[in-house]
Image: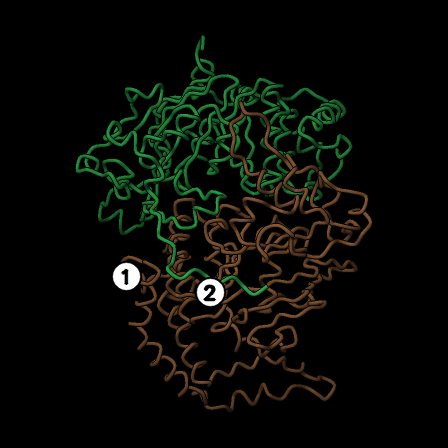
Amino acid sequence: MSGPPLVEAVGLEKLFPLTRSVTEMYRGSPRRAIHAVDGVSLSIGSRETVGLIGESGSGKTTLGWLIARLHEPTGGALRFEGEDVLPLRGTALRQWRRNVQVVFQDPVGSLDPRLKVWQIVGEPIRAQGGISKVEVRARVKELLPTVGLPPDCLDQFPHEFSGGGRQRLSLARALSVNPKLVVLDEPTSALDVAVQAQILNRLVELQRERDVAYLLITHNVAAVRYVADRVAVMYLGQAVEVGTVRNVLEHPIHPYTKALLAAVPVADARRRRTRFKIGGDVPSLVNPPPGCRFSPRCPYVIDRCRVEDPPLREIPGAAGQLVACHRAEEVKDIAPESLLTTVDAPTTPKATAPA
Amino acid sequence: MTEPVVRIENLSIDYVVGAGRFRAVSGVSLEVPQGHVVGIVGETGCGKSTLAQAIPRLLPEPPATIGEGRVVFRGTDLVQVPLWKMPAIRGTGINMIFQEPLNSLNPAFRIYDQVAEAIYIRRIRDEGNLVIDHRPKPPFDYSRGPRTDAGEALLRPIVPPNAKRAVETRRRREGLRDEVLEYLRLVRINDPETILELYPHELSGGMRQRVMIAMALSEKPELLIADEPTSALDVTIQAQVLTLMKELIEEVNTSILFISHDLGVIAETADELGVMYAGKLIEFGPVAELFEAPRHPYTKALLHASPTRYKSEGPLATIAGNVPNLSHPPAGCRFHPRCPIAQPKCRVMPGPMLEPVAVGSANHKSACFYPGEVAGIP
């Protein structure tokens, strides 16, 4: 890759401070904050898709919003095509927004029920200014077929569309100003498998046609596998593993990535006898303790993990794969399936039902 | 040959909305054998949840009406049972776990009270003392003059007549601590003594679902209906809850009807699997056989639609077209507009019935005229 990457986040941080009660202030108890994104470095090349996977509360949506500048980061740097975008304000910021657009998580809540299709899809175009209604309508009409919607639905309302249709509207709105990066926040989680496959196919085709980069935020490993070029795995506000999609999904190094992949149910009836071995809940993000965030649940934990925060580092022998684990070299070759135990079939086989 | 726990025969359920009327479930026949886990999969709007809620008669009637068919449980047809008698059958007979545990737990009561209530109700039900009269009261007839009971209420003694019973209830509930702890341990909750005193909002999603499972199992139901029990949970938490359910299935040995849209979840838990499309059960059979050799084009398409490939390996398989509108379902087989092997017969002939397929085990049934040709679909 020549030149700077499209987006470069360095040590990006977002803390949401918690309000203190009067009692707490008198006692002088420390200020507390939710560490939603805690020092994440990530780069996205042009025309590249980076998948961001993690469970709820891992900070993946917050990171997406930070990159789209919908949240102000509390620390770190964000560069777009080599230029620092954090000082941008007012008109300059609005001008910049045409570069990065977002498809929001909730296809119902993110479309104004009182606006018509052309108003919704054309809103980013109008926000850029200097364009007449007729032109907006014409642009929207051209745009709708590219996401697989009929061009004659300009005057319909969002409630007239199915879940997949609404997601397509959202996508059309994001693409209306020809952005260089689209942040896709859970674009398919509300959809059925068949519709999900249609949307994912469309996303990949659109990327080829329009040279757009994607940041795909999802908990769905299957969607990431199909759409992404590179993957970042997040756990409790930190990126724990970054690498190409094949490397991460087929040879995961970080114990959390292994656990995540082992936990995904597979449509294979032979998995019936397996049991998932990782216990415990995702801990709180309020002032997390020092050390590796996964250490309370990690099966390979050593004393050092509880004290020292592991940095994201390159692992020798795994090309370009960054992992934040003290024991990465030792656990590198353990297969995710080892986090599942297989149980013997019950001694008495179940009688087949009378036909 | 044991009798199945529940036998659904040709069940049809309609929703009447305004002037419209559409059939959410049409002609579904299904059996849940003793000790088996029967899975139901299908896309949104295929009628799987309607079917699940119709069995314990939890559907709001109206707008829902059970058009025809029978649900045979313990030898009685539940469709004919008046609604006010159903609470005696729910609980120990049929119990449910819902998708969103926060909506199913009462936010105003501690975990202890809620689990204890379930145990307490089972006790009095076992003693035969459970009288829940949900018969609708006739509305007050104002044509016979104004209400007079308002003044009467003032004259009533301050201690209500059933106060003695309330004290008794509280005393019996307090004594259930050990039993509540036992059930919380059964669902592998760490430190159950602390959990007892907490309110539902203080628990994580996985914990809440465990409490729901504990409550459902404490009534020792003959049939447990799990309606998307893990869909609201994160994958690692889902894997934990599924592991727990798989262990409990073998320990407790209840029969389960497991509803999900996730083929992976079903594959891991169910013994038999039914696939629903547009209100109809279109294929039914042992899980392994259904996954390896589906005999209905829709099942095959559904199995192929879950993305398992990289973008360099070509586009994902999709199912052409859309799910039909249930107020005007297509004539003939409901899947024919989207089916790759549809023949003229499929368009005209009324939808085929679920019939055993010639190949495979006797319990494998498909509602396709050409089950033998499904294997040839690329």
Color of chain B here? Answer: brown
Q: In this view, does A226 lie above or below A209?
A: below
From what the image shows, is residue B82 above or below residue B302? below
Q: In which quarter of the image is residue A42?
A: top left
Q: Check disc 1 and report the residue beneath it.
A: B194
For disc 1, the neighbor class at 10 Å (few under 14, some 14 to 19, many from 20) is few
| Chain to which mark 1 belongs | B
- In the image, farthest residue toward the left: A303
Separation of residues labelled 1 and 2 (CA atoms): 33 Å
Q: Position of residue B370 (x, y in %)?
A: 71, 46
Write the residue at 45% across / 62% down.
Answer: B105
* Residue type indicated by callout 2: Gly
Q: Is residue A52 above or below residue B181?
A: above
Crowd class of label 2 (few under 14; some 14 to 19; many from 20; radius 10 Å): many
Q: What residue type is labelled 1?
A: Thr
Specify the color scheme. by chain
- At a point 65% along the width and 76% down the height, the residue shown is B80
Residue at the outermost front position: B359
Label 2 belongs to which residue?
Answer: B35
